Amino acid sequence: MIAKVTEAHEAPEISSESEESIVKKRRVVVPGEIIVSGEDYLPSEGTRREGMNILASRFGLAEESGRVVKVIPVTGTFIPRKNNVVIGRVTNITFNGWVVDIDSASSGFLPIDESPRFINKNEMDQFLAIGEVVAAKIWSINTRGIDLTLKSKGLGKLEGGFTFRIIPNRVPRVIGREGSMIMLIKEKTGCDITVGQNGWIWIKGQNLDDQIRARKAIEFVAEKFHVEGLTDKMEEWFEKN
Amino acid sequence: MALKREDGRKASDLRPMQAKVGVVPNADGSAIFTFGDTIAIAAVYGPKQLHPQHMQDPSTGILRCNYDLLSFSVSDRKKPGPSRRSQELSKMTQWALEPALDLEGFPNTVIDVEVQIIQADAGTRTAGINAAALALAHAGVPMRNLVCAVAIGKLDKDIVVDLDKSEEDFEGGEGPTDFPVAKLANTDQYTLLQLDGKIQPERVKEVLSFADESCAKIYEIQKKALKEALGE
Amino acid sequence: MCQDLRNSEESIKGGFGRMSTMDTSNLTIETLRQMFEQGKRFDGRSLKDYRPITVEHNVSNKAEGSTRVRIGKTEVLAGVKLQVGAPYPDSKDKGNLMVSGDLLPLASPRFESGPPGFNAIELPRLVDRAIRESGMIDFKKLVITGEKVWTVIIDVFPINDDGNLIDAATIAASVALKDATFPGLDKDNNVDYHIKTQNKLPLSKETFPVSISFYKLGSSLFLDPTREEEEAAEARITFGISLWNGQNMINSCQKRGAKPLSRAEVESMMPILLEKQIYLNEKLKKFL
């Protein structure tokens, strides 16, 4: 089963080029810095109100969209959210499911009932063995941990290719507006690519050179995340690389 | 001021400061901060899973700090590994930073802050706290504010900021006093207060005024370092 | 000097800098194996190429000599401290060498605090043997009086581990030794660190020990791995090598990992070892 996940893109995206006309220019803010003053403004993610002021409560790019003010994070670890698609590695098999390392503060658990077809309890490791890699979706976060499912299009065991990691908060940029960036990279390299919200990315192509090129392209985007007109820059990059 | 500082600084002059984030690519956040010849480096890992499980707090994430001197950062080589001094300063560092953080969104997790002094010339704990605050911000950890730290000193009767090693070894009169302070930037909340030496209780408010003025300067350096990291 | 220290080539904007604690997946290991078979690497190097190497001097001014070495994104600090002590009873006519250090949790999410694990013990030991056996230090000239000799202590600390720490640490240690100067002595022959001298350590002019580590995955041998490549490797062998009396000599060697190395593999390493020894010495010349 080869997953072709293009729906793995539920995270709030960094609004891209075309929106910039209605959005004021983003600027870098540090925690505690006043972003705007005025009672009209609404503090959103990464901000808080103190009196008249909206303050940044984390480091990142402040953005005003109408009256709504938020800080877009650009660094940091993966914070799991419901419906995130993640790429993880099976680390253990229990009597009723698989423990999956999803590179976050708590590991994921994939119950046997959440596999896409019936799995006999004696044959769990034939479906997914320790060390194997899956694309899964977070369907619940509770005090016990993070529950995963494979019951959705494009999820399942990943075969062939390789995985690597970028800073999770750069994922929206790699995906681009309505998937435009990742589509471009797939088109130019001919690779299957699954982007996990946890920053783990799986690439599989026709040959090694295509795969290497796809990784380089994604790392280029992750590094140039704050550059404007990135899609054009990416087109240029492909002409040179 | 009766006393002339050896390096020509005025009482309220800090040593030259430098700061930069992203110096440990492996870490979630990292920074270097210098006061003159004192160089501190800090790396932040997390929020991540906390082991053993019984140490976990279901209501909030936990901050864990480790401060130490590289063995060759001081004249008399320090044996690698924690000493009583480094264990105390690790805790001081943790308490200095904790009030700035908002970790309720990360129950059962830990954030590790690792501070190492590469070169020591007095003021290592305060340089370490400045580096650590930067590294935490760089790691995208939710924070109310940055934390700024400075050692205020008193040499005989004169209050001066940011003692260097030769000033720490000052002799005569009321002797040297070392008064390291950290505060939440842009507030009147102090998060580190330590003192060794001799000072009249009525002079403490003078020390705090010097600390406030110094921290405002440190804050600007920290802010600039973070903004430069994203090309601003 | 602070300026040097901060002139990092590292991209602070690096979108893929941070290393994960998630183990390298079987898929990635298999892809790397195929890539190595075709002589390919993700960063475009050939299998025997080193990443760019830079050296900075006097990065910690309380040390008698100190250096920062970067190989790609791997960074290691080494510092030399000189102490006066007693000679070992069985070698009263010689000074002492001690190499120590630690894998600081600062440098990698994989390094944990607490008692040193095998990797933390192995790193300084390998550096120690590469230097000690090379003949770089003339231990007899470290004697001060009959009862007092110099002890040379080298500490190595990784600041960022992106693979190949041993090769980086040996370079850092060797350069720090070259840079080191004796502190002064008082009238009782005790160290006074406030007195600096211009006197260098008694070192051989020609001998500059380096470590060269070969890594093996499948049937491929490669040098200077990134962390990802290092984690995929099935075996490693580290050689300490240096020039002595006009000849290149292997001074130390240690194989690591349960995978054996064939006779053909070991023999194939020898010409590469010589070539890389000359390459590293040539590259590092401008920093000495």
Image (cartoon, coloured by chain):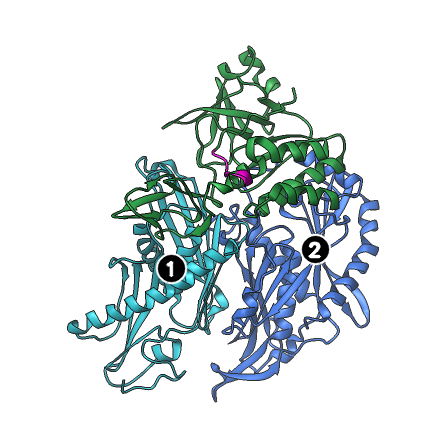
Chain colours: A green, B cyan, C blue
Near mark 1 (Cα within 10 A), the count class, few <14, some 14-19 or many ≥20, is many
Residue C162 part of the magenta-drawn span = no
**Does B105 sit above or below residue C83?**
above
Q: Amino acid at mark 1?
A: Ile
Quadrant (top left/top right/bottom left/bottom right) for the N terminus of chain B:
bottom left
**Does B125 sit above or below residue C218?**
below
Q: Farthest left residue?
A: B202
Q: Which mark is residue C51?
A: 2
State which chain disc 1 sits on: B
Quadrant of res C153 = bottom right
Quadrant of res C243 = bottom right
- Distance (Cα) linking label 1 and label 2: 34 Å
Rendered location of residue C198, percent (x, y): 59, 84
Q: Which stretch appears magenta?
A: A12-18
Q: Mark 1 and mark 2, same subunit?
A: no
Residue nearer the viewer, C196 or C108: C108
| Prevailing secondary structure class for the magenta stretch in the rendered image | loop
Residue nearer the viewer, C196 or B105: B105
**Does C286 sit above or below residue C217?**
below
Q: Amino acid at mark 2?
A: Arg
- Is residue B25 something that shows in the picture? yes
**Circle 1 SS class:** helix
Residue A13 part of the magenta-drawn span = yes
Residue nearer the viewer, B119 or C128: B119
The residue at which mark 1 appears reads as: B129
* Residue that appears at 74% across and 43% down: A239
**Circle 2 SS class:** loop
Rendered location of residue C1, percent (x, y): 54, 72
